[in-house]
Amino acid sequence: MPDEQKKEVRINFPQDLQGGVYANNMVVSHTREEFIMDFLMVGPRAGAVTARVITSPGHIKRIIAALQDNIKRYEQRFGNVKVAEEPKGSIGFTPSTKH
């Protein structure tokens, strides 16, 4: 078996995605094959889905591990992060359960 070497992969970052999107809420659903994460921006009178990410169960575990590692390093550098309060009442968004 040949020695595995790290390969550099060039990633194209489309210009229309470079500014990112803001989300202050998230809804997660799943099927056997995938996790669906809808990121929302919810204001006092209205809300909108700003992004949807669909990934496999194996990748969602890697995402969770990466987030846990990054929050740990963030808190070591900047101090503890307080958990945000849950929004009060319904936000008026009910994801479809038909997948």
Image (spheres, helix red, strand yellow):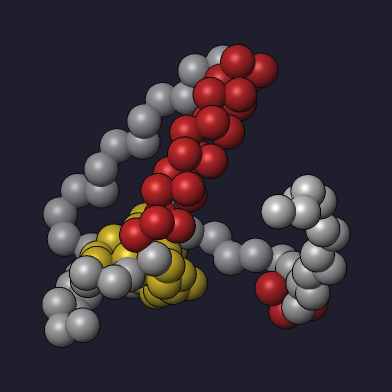
Give the quarter of the image for residue 85.
top left
Q: Residue furthest front?
A: 1
- Taking the spot 15% from the left edge, 77% from the top edge, the residue there is 97
Q: Position of residue 70 (x, y in %)?
A: 58, 33
Give the quarter of the image for residue 26.
bottom left
Q: Is residue 11 left or right of residue 92?
A: right
Q: Position of residue 11 (x, y in %)?
A: 78, 69
Q: Is residue 62 left or right of residue 76?
A: left
Q: Can residue 43 be seen? A: no
In the image, is residue 10 above or below residue 6? below
Quadrant position of the C terminus in the picture: bottom left
- Taking the spot 71% from the left edge, 66% from the top edge, the residue there is 19
- Taking the spot 53% from the left edge, 24% from the top edge, the residue there is 72
Quadrant position of the N terminus in the picture: bottom right
Q: Position of residue 30 (x, y in %)?
A: 24, 67
In the image, is residue 61 above or below residue 46? above
